[in-house]
Image: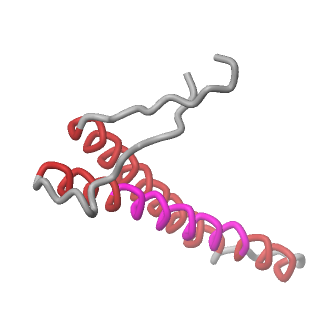
Amino acid sequence: MGGRVSDVELQPAAVSAMAVRFRASGMELGRARDAHAAAADEAVVPVASAHARAVHRWTEGLRVAAAALVEVGTELDACVRATTDGDEQTAATFRGIRP
């Protein structure tokens, strides 16, 4: 404790598992975004303009979040590959995790 930072090395299997979960979450979020966008296309109320703006913001936010989650999964996979291939220049070292 006392503000000390300890180095933590994650095993490739753990990082691979995280990559799978991030990618799956991103894909699921992308499907939710698509369903939301499809449902929003059917709005038929007088406040359609305000609704459309809110829908656009929400849909765009979901798109960005989904893409980010998938990208994290891809990057984690790349780190595992670099580590298991012995490529020390691109292998990731996970640091700064506080107990």
Q: Which residues are magenta?
A: 57-73
Question: Looking at the picture, does residue 42 appear above or below residue 29?
Answer: below
Q: Main secondary structure of the magenta part?
A: helix
Q: Nearer the viewer, residue 63 or 10?
A: 10
Q: Is residue 27 left or right of residue 5?
A: left
**Residue at image location 34% in from the left, 35% down from the top:** 9
Total numbered circles: 0
Question: Looking at the picture, does residue 77 appear above or below residue 67?
Answer: above
Q: Residue furthest left?
A: 85
- Residue 63 x %, y %: 55, 70
Q: Nearer the viewer, residue 54 or 61?
A: 61
**Residue at image location 13% in from the left, 49% down from the top:** 84
Which coloring applies here? secondary structure
Which quarter of the image is occupied by the N terminus?
top right
Which quarter of the image is occupied by the C terminus?
top right
Q: Residue furthest top?
A: 1
Q: Could you say which quadrant of the image residue 55 lies in? A: bottom right
Question: Looking at the picture, does residue 67 appear above or below residue 91?
Answer: below
- Residue 35 x %, y %: 52, 64
Q: Is residue 26 left or right of residue 47?
A: left
Q: Is residue 66 left or right of residue 23?
A: right
Q: Could you say which quadrant of the image residue 2 lies in? A: top right
**Residue at image location 10% in from the left, 55% down from the top:** 85
- Residue 45 x %, y %: 83, 74
Q: Residue furthest bottom?
A: 49
Question: Looking at the picture, does residue 60 appear above or below residue 85?
Answer: below
Q: Is residue 70 left or right of residue 13?
A: right
Q: Is residue 71 magenta?
A: yes
- Residue 48 x %, y %: 82, 79
